[in-house]
Amino acid sequence: MKTITQASAILAIGIAAAVTFPATAQDAHHAGHVGQAGHAALSPEAAAFLAENDKAMERMMTAMHVAPTGDVDRDFVAMMIPHHQGAIDMARAVLRSSRDETVRRLAQEIIVTQLDEIQAMRLAIADNVTHKEH
């Protein structure tokens, strides 16, 4: 079951990335000129999701850029927590807009598993500090 859960989370993140990021340079160029006007052609739910998802992705990418401390474990966790939080934020965005029960269940599962993993990472770092002190 855990493998299915992890695969589902990876699939959802991939889908969110595919929806968010242009596939080609031409798409990126077009997106830059279309901007919010392109969102106007979408349903209100789709436009709301894309806007919220874009913000979540920006926050995630910004937060993942951390100054290296030289402690590989801390640096890894410092980058991964925002990555997992980004998945949570994107899942919450789709919950506000999606009507598909399968996608909604997947998003709910992503929220639960990513919160658990964030907690596990924080505990691992705290445990690592305790072990280094002894």
Image (cartoon, helix red, strand yellow):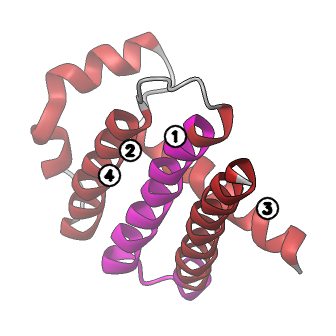
Residue 29's quadrant in the figure? Answer: top left
Q: Which residue is mark 1?
A: 79
Mark 1 to mark 3: distance in Å? Answer: 21 Å
Q: Nearer the viewer, mark 4 or mark 1?
A: 1
Provide the secondary structure element on which disc 4 rests.
Answer: helix
Most foreground residue, 23 or 108: 108
Q: Which residue is mark 3?
A: 7
Neighbour class for label 4 at 10 Å: few (<14), some, many (≥20)?
many
Neighbour class for label 2 at 10 Å: few (<14), some, many (≥20)?
many
Q: Answer yes or no: do the residues labelled 4 and 2 have beta carbons within 8 Å?
A: yes
Q: Quadrant of the C terminus?
A: bottom right
Mark 2 to mark 3: distance in Å? Answer: 21 Å
Looking at numbered disc 2 in the image, what kind of residue is underneath it?
Met
- The secondary structure making up most of the magenta span is helix
Looking at numbered disc 4 in the image, what kind of residue is underneath it?
Ala
Identified at 22% across, 52% down, the residue is: 51
Mark 4 to mark 1: distance in Å? Answer: 15 Å
User: Above or below — where is 38 with respect to 52?
Assistant: above
